[in-house]
Amino acid sequence: MKYEMVAGLETHVELTTKTKIFCGCTTQFGGDPNTHCCPICIGLPGTLPKLNEEVVNYAIKAGLATNCEIPEISKMDRKNYCYPDLPKAYQISQYDKPLCLNGYVELSNGRKIRLTRIHIEEDAGKLIHSHGDTYVDYNRGGVPLIEIVSEPDIRSPEEAKEYVEKLQLIMKYIGVSDCKMQEGSMRCDVNISVRPEGSDEFGTRTEIKNMNSITFMTKAMEYEFNRQVDLIESGGKVEQETLRYDEVSDTTSSMRGKEDANDYRYFRDPDLVTIQVPREKVEEIRKTLPELPDQKLQRYISELEIPENDARLLVKYRAVAEFFEKASEGTKTPRTAANFIIGQIFSILENDNAKEEFDIKVSAENLNALIKLLDEGKIKMNLAKKTLAKMLETGKAPSELIDENDMGSLDDAALTELCQKAVEANPNAVTDYKNGKVKAIKALVGFVMKNSRGKADAAAAEQKLIAMIE
Ligand code: ADP
Ligand code: MG
Ligand code: ZN
């Protein structure tokens, strides 16, 4: 029998507000252990939390960017569990009245992954196990999180990957999180079940906790899918449980049986007032949304006539998209800027991280100036490429690198003269060409290009040379 994967993701995203969710402590990553703490975020008796309004604004922004509804009333609840990373023995989270409901994220295959909800909560501290002892660092305790819960609409590891990448990109574009999985500012729990293809009932699910890399997440899903299928095929039953994934052995193993909501004894946090979200506030936040990655992609393709694959590469990194828009402004065709960026500039940026940071010496204004020289016919493409290479090394403006003498193209007489020189200086190439070695003409064209300092039109030079020799 053939089986289908069914998955739903719970994605935790750390918000980049300056201060924590219920106190004034910094949210900065790192720092000496327990230095970003105060009596409130370590849960000392007698302290009271106060909700940071910025957290609410960020979460609403995230909800609007993912097509959610924002209810007028929301509240905070206590999720009780006892573990040393949680000094109060409860986490302040949201249970039945989250800030955002019923959104979706659309994949490139046109499928919509529905979002059940987005709620806000506080992060827990971090346990460090060392030399047989356990230490606790509460710097992360109280850092604001949003949890984005999807419906079980995901059907493959590829869809899960695209879904997570899409969320990452959206959150970065709207500036609510840096979504660095390796630093833990984005983490996913993957719920997964299988069912016979064609069936519309759900199977029993397992939950793989705390995935912090997309590569490992897809591997874990692959493994867990096969494990469940094998189990069912051999007459067994999938148990609902919480799993951990081991990267080294590429297997999942049981952490604990599945807890359900009752185990957490959720109840309204009596220390915090009801959150009222006036409609005007929602509209105000909506106005602050930038153009989102999907909208940009569509505009690049249909208005700027950038080929789809190139457009995807440009919108994949926010800094690149911004650079491209400035560099192409007022030029004849935006494709020229796109080609320079995806070709010459990307070739010096080794990996995703480098492209993400986009720390290059050339300013968008200078690339724009270079392209305008091309547009006006003052320089030819090969000189433009050489100049860009120098710009990337030195950070200089094109006007500092291109000599007045290099500007403007050669007139016909000058080109003829150079071609004659080429023929005289390269008798061997001329003989070769006459003897049928067609490629020998390239040596002559090369001579012309070099001696014109790149100003000659290579195709025109070739025609002229052939005419001269024959
Ligand atoms: P809990 O609150 O116990 O974590 P939820 O019902 O809120 O459970 O679901 C958590 C996640 O599990 C959601 O992302 C949801 O889409 C997903 N999910 C629920 N049922 C299934 C299933 N049968 N197979 C795969 N994923 C599921
Ligand atoms: Mg869960
Ligand atoms: Zn604090």
Image (cartoon, helix red, strand yellow):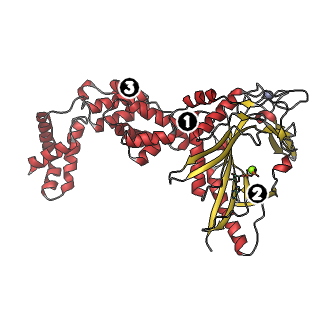
Image quadrant occupied by the N terminus: bottom right
Above or below residue 309? Residue 303 is above
- Which image quadrant is residue 205 in? bottom right
**Which label sits on residue 243?**
2
Residue 223: x %, y % from top left? 67, 63
Q: Are marks 2 and 3 in contact (CB under 8 Å)?
A: no
Q: Which residue is mark 3?
A: 397
Q: Which mark lies nearer to you, 1 or 3?
A: 1
Up-down relation of residue 403 to residue 311 (above or below): above
Check disc 1: other Cα within 10 Å, few if <14, some if 14-19, many if 20+.
Answer: many
Q: Which residue is mark 1?
A: 173
For the point 64% across and 47% down, which residue is it? 115
Q: Quadrant of residue 232?
A: bottom right
The answer to which of 431 and 166 lies nearer the viewer is: 166
First of labels 1, 3 by sequence position: 1
Say which amino acid is labelled 1: Tyr
Give 465 or 349, whichever is nearer the viewer: 349
- For numbered disc 2, what is the local secondary structure? strand
